[in-house]
Image (tube, grey):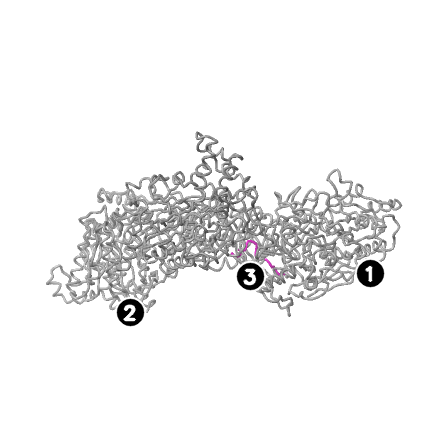
Amino acid sequence: MGCGASRNGSWITSDFQKNQFPKLSETNQSPVREHYEVVVIGSGYGGGIAACRASRAKKSVCVLEQGKEYRPGDFPEDFSGTHVHLKIQGKGAKGSGLELFHLVVSDDVTVVKGCGLGGTSLINANVGLEADPRVFHDDAWPHELQEDMENFKRDIENARAVLRPQPYPFSSTHFKELEKVAKHLHNNVTDIEDLDAVFKQATKKPMTELFYKTPLYVNNAIKPTNQFGIPQPPCNGCGNCISGCNTGAKNTINMNYLADAKYHGAHIFTEIKVQKIEQIVDCGRWTIFYQRYTEDKLEEDAQIVTAQIVILAAGTLGSTEILQRSKQNGGLDISDEIGKGFSGNGDQLGISFANDNSANTLGLRSDFNPKRHEPPGPIITGVIDMRDEGVPVSDGFILEDGGIARSQIVPYKVLLHAAAPIFGDDDDPSDDWEQLALKMQGKAVDHTLPILGMSHDSKRLGMDGTKNSGQIVLDQDGVRIDWPGSGKSAGYTRMDKAYRKAAKALGGTYIENPVWSDNFLPFYNGRNTVTVHPLGGCNMGETGADGVVNHKGQVFEGNTGDVFKGLYVMDGSVIPTSLGVNPSLTISGVAERCMRLMAKDYSWGEQDYSFLENPESVAWDKNTKAGIKLVEVLEGEIVEAKKQAKFEFRSELTLLSNDLEKTINVEPHSMVLDGTATCRLMSKKPLTFKGALDLFARTSGPDSVVDSEKMTYKGHLIASDKKKMYYFFARKIIHKDHPLETGFADTTTAFCSIYEGEDDSGTKVGDGVLRLTIPNLIKAIKSVHVINVQGGFADRTMWTAKFFKLFLHENWDVYSPFSEGDGILHPSQVRQIRPLNLPKNVQAEVHKVLTRDQIVLRLIRYKGGSKGPVIASHGVGVSSRIFSLDTVQMNFVEYMVQRQYDVFLLEWRSSFNSSSAAKKYTLDDVAKYDYPAAVDKVLELTGHKDVQMMVHCAGSNAFFMSLLGGYLEGKVRNVVASQTSFIVIPSTWIKIKSFFHLPSLAENILGADALDVYDEDRSWTDKLYDKFMKATADALAPFEEECKNSVCHKCTFLFGRMWQHENMNEDTHSTLHELFGVTSVSVLKHLSRIAKEGHVVGYDGEELYLPGYSKDKEQRLDSVKYLNHSRHLNIPICFLGGDENCVFEPEGLDMAHALAKEAHPQQDYTRVRIPDYGHIDCLVGKHASSDAYPYIVDALDKYAHKDQNANAVVNRNLKSALQMSNKKGRKAKRRQVKHVLSANLDHPDFNHVDDDDDDDDSELTHLTDAQKIASIELNNELPWEIPVTWKKKTLSNNKVHKKRAYRPPTSEVEDIHIKQITFPENSRKRDMYAISDTHIGAYISVNIAERVHVFLEKLIAAAFEVHSLILNGDILEMWYHPIDKPPKTVDEHINDWKSGEKIPGSLGFIQCVQQLADEHDVKVYYLAGNHDNMMTGAAVKELFGENVQYIKGKLIFEIQEEGEIYRVRFEHGHDYDLFNSYRLGEDPDGLIYGQNMGYYIARFAATGTFTHSSCISKLLFHALPPLLEKVGFDFIGSLLMKILSKDRHARSLIGRILDSANNGDVDTEQEIVLDHEGKYVTVERLMKYRFLKRTVDKFGAGQAFDMLKHSLGDFSDYLETCDEDVVVMGHSDLKACKKMKGRRGELIYANCGAWFDEMKTYSYVKVTAPWKGGKKGHGRVEVNFQPMHRENVNTAK
């Protein structure tokens, strides 16, 4: 290192450059992980210490800093730079929030603070003074800290060891000037005001204690690095400490604590503003909502990250603001003391202007020449300490010399010259001429000494103990400080006196702080202040009643003494008093203490305070690599998977690369994705997106498209409450579809799928198409920004050009007419290409095959399993895409992979994807070269000795030519020949073409080497030929086969009619241009020759493959050559074809089958005719997977490996045939499947086929005798009403459903859970049972648990028929507690229920529920009612186990049966009861301690002698009639509610109810109702509560009257809003089972009734959905009951 220091503070800096200092933060816009153990918000003294200590404890740590990262060399050194780096908040607001300097301007107090990685340490004066120990004696400090002062001192020492405060080794000029002031104060007591004890005491102190050098966090040593491995030169004295140290000598937090945190694995992020935090109660985590800065602007939508521990260290104003917003917007219950207790630390600035001598306080450029300039030294170097034990601590203060950074000189000079005439005070007129001379010479400013004082601005430290402090208040632009008269404390007056003495000692003019001066009173309402040391706002305290955090920094829950687990504050905001000195060392000590105690509480082990042994060896990545970022906005629609509803989707994603060179040069050109997405299908709030993008990756994997590239988006969408995570997958397919395509549509259109959970194995949420619109494309291009480049504009431009070159190069490769194309395709609109539905481990592998005549073929492999290998070969004019078609529900590849086949798609030279497709070749070439090369390659890849073949059309002809020619001897295990084989009987049109030699005419007359099916403009001869083809096709097509698709017409002309239109869906038919391409004329000539001869022959007609063949049997059997060649047919062959084939007559396969059988009678040959299918529709038809593929698999399975089950194949095959024979709307005469099966059909599954849909048990499994008895016993209950038949949906009764989309319920306070159910075929587990209102544990139902236990034992015995059990609310009792006793907690209830001692039968009930859920596969749901509304998911799991799901709301079953959806809603019903609804909860006073009126009525009932079960409804019958008599019977409905809501009527009603509830046993005027934790509600308050008025005001009088009817058990008006088929409720003792009016028309309503002892019976609802096994396919809803008196409970047990 070429560094040295001199006596004048200069230094030599030849080697130190900016890029030698490591970059600690992640690249801007780098993705924040979804979860960390510790998240630290802020990076100042508290944040740096927290990050360092947590990362040293081996915790995953994330630091979120709002500002930017500044390294030495980044700070401004001129005024223009400072102006750009200034943020003004409040009055005169300006700036984005990323600026280095923040000025928070309020009417009373102005705060100056720093913003950047390192916090205010970047711009403070580095002073490390300790506070007067007496400060901590104030009762504002928690007693735990006061009693821990010895350890606290060690904590301060630990901070001191890192920050290394030390005096400046040289004496600056302004230090000497301050020394004059000190001597003056020490030696002179002449004025009357000097009788002040503080000034008097100064004369008694030794001079060395009154004045001394300040310890500074500044490096003065010459070492390669500091103790953390950071290069750190010594201070050169440039005097720019408060604008940022460009030399690197200042010990800012990023040079030590943060560097150490980074070294130990912390992730540090900058330019992120945290908005709020929320608690995730269920899992003990915290959610942090933050926004990123993009282009110096905050992104609109917030993202989230979760943590076990959150440490707020964003500074006094920042941490307080975040907690206030979390309380206001996030519902976090924080102490009401938040924001209070603000202190400006008694900061005051005084200036002695135009002194006798130079003070040399103006900063220089950091690269100043020491030979020309005397360095001013650090900003502060000395202190006059006016604190002393002889005076009260609140009276003490300190004075420090000051300086001005170079970037601040211009405004400083302007302000001085402007303020001196107004605010200046010079009591020595003798030197006026000297001062005027200084001003005229421009030296007045150089002769000026700013002095910074710190005192105490809060009376809390005074003798009276009263509070006098400011308050931090949320404001539109952030926060403001309200503190009228903030500068009126005695400390400011005392410092003002000292400033005047200083000016007198220096011979200058004293300039008052303008905002504090009396001369500013016309502009301000009192003396105001400016502070650079804000404290308080989240003050420490004993409880939440007097503080926000405890002595450990833990945040209090509300105003209590309890704390939030995992939520801390560690910065200046926790300091509860002013300190009277620079507070950084005290704040650091408090943070060190909090982290020490946190480590102990969380058992992290002993804190490691050691330093690196060899810090010079730390290999920091100092030379960051160039990166790039841009913003892409995708917009479109998501179609919901379940209901097909459409939802708008918008994502704003930042695409980031931290290594642009790697992104450009290394496939798949990856970038990071980070941003937000909005879609109401998943969340009403924006979701956080975190993922990755692969640019221009060659397609591979299950969604691959051969010879294409793709942009793939993968990531997670995270809901703000972290309760939901979604997997997002999208892709842009980059594929050339036609010669004129530019790629714009492909690169701006993404097809996405969204799944629940972490990957695509979860339930699909929906699919969609997202587009990058032109405006958003322009925005994306403009947002491209190169980052981490040390150079200037030229370097950024170079990297930007390289990035765009990547796009241009990749697009050129795909779309340029001069690049290797994929074949000529017809222009078409962009459409969504469905990815292959394949397992994750099955990816497309492309293998090139070189034939002996030097033609390159391709084999595309999908390794679905060990069966096979199977080679699938296409015909002419197409490609292997006929096997991987995406426009059908299941293509051939997916079907075969699903059945564990190793599939190879052969792209032989006829494929239009091949460059040979349009060249001259013959099928002889294919037979001789292509098939042998392909088969050998497959055998090489798989290691097998033979293959299985599925050959189609001309590919079949060529295969048999190769087989008969002996080219595949012993290499083929068996074959499926599709549509044709070695015998060819052409259709009429093919015969005509062959007769007139049309292919030869095309070649000779038109000069065409190849023909295609496209429509684009060509030469006049091409156009003439096109028109001729179209006219011919129209003439040949029958009426029902005519269409308007020109490609279809041309295919018909070239090949004959290739499909039955009824078998093609529109998607396939409209994209025929993607299936068909160019066809060589030479191969068409060869096919014409074969058609003419009727069997496979050579191109010139030679008998190369079946020599000696004759239609005459005797002649061919006498031919030795024929017999010799036909021996190659001695392998199993399935001849498969469509019965309506119009290319080849089906009789050709019949004849081939017969000839093969003739040659080899013992061989397995089968012939399959597929009714109503033509030619290629057997492979690409919409129902090919069920109508044709099974026959192919059947033929292959028989000769698959030995571990495959042939019987299973026959089973599937015959079932498919039977299904096809039963299809409606098809020609019944042709449904007979002409199929010859070699396998044994005596399979057990074929012994019985049941056609009787009305037989209830025909498709059910056989019942044992025990099961029959259990079923009879359970279903032998007495129906309360006649069971209601739930009719099967048909077209006639489903019209309403067709007109209206399903509308799920909504609720302000309840969750809605929708469960999709598909019952397994032939399963008996279809019955759904619901019970409610058992109130286990209530005093009014002593034996209920035992009775429920009996019922559940019956249910267990018949569990083979039980699909689900719904515990439909009020199962467990939590309300009935006397008012004079505190109610039990949830934990106490759990102990009672589990013990079984206090509540007879409760343990048995719990065990039965567990047994049903765990051992009998019964789905059990616990729905919260009103009496058990306090239940939680954790409590349910503790009682019943993991398999019982807790739902606080409504449960809806969506049952899919035979293509229809049936819906059943289960809910308790209290949400619409006037007395028991929790919907008033949005009003802060809407619920008393979170409870409704019904709760308190129940408490009264439990106090008196009232024992009736139906408490509220019966009480209303007692209370309402007298009231109605008073208001008259003519007032009904809403008018009644308006009257009831009046104060006197409401009080009368509540009084009557409460009086009736306790039978007069309780004095309603005197009593109180005890609640938890000493809380209580007076009866008087209940009487004045006016809940009726609140209800009317919120919901309207009409709905309030409906709620009154609900409380009496009448739910009719509510049911009219229900959109389900069946609604099952509880909450009422009025059992019901009947049809009622619903939203769609008629629905079935059932009520479980109640299980109270006085009911004499228990009841339950049983629901069986319609299904084909039911009587006439209908379902059933019934309410059953059985008398169960107490005397026969024991018998039943």
- Is residue 529 rendered magenta in the image? no
Q: Amino acid at mark 3?
A: Ser
Q: Which residue is mark 2?
A: 945
User: In the image, residue 709 lies at what x, y percent?
Assistant: 42, 55
Q: Quadrant of the C terminus?
A: bottom left
The image quarter in which residue 1606 lies:
top left
Spatial CA span between label 2 and label 1: 99 Å
Spatial CA span between label 2 and label 3: 55 Å
Disc number lying in front (2 or 3): 3
**What secondary structure is the stretch in magenta mostly built from?**
loop
Q: Are marks 1 and 3 in contact (CB under 8 Å)?
A: no
Q: Which residue is mark 1?
A: 208
The image quarter in which residue 137 lies:
bottom right
User: In the image, residue 1617 lies at what x, y percent?
Assistant: 40, 40
Sequence-wise, the earlier of marks 1 and 3 is 3
* Numbered label attached to residue 60: 3
In this rendering, would 1674 be left or right of 1620?
left
Q: Are marks 2 and 1 in contact (CB under 8 Å)?
A: no
Q: Amino acid at mark 1?
A: Thr
Depth order, front residue of 1474/123: 1474
Q: Is residue 1583 visible?
A: yes
Residue at left offset 25%, top offset 68%: 970
Instruction: Report the span colored magenta.
Output: 21-34
User: In the image, residue 109 lies at what x, y percent?
Assistant: 70, 45
Sequence-wise, the earlier of marks 2 and 1 is 1
Q: Amino acid at mark 2?
A: Lys
Secondary structure of the residue carrying tag 3 is loop
Secondary structure of the residue carrying tag 1 is helix
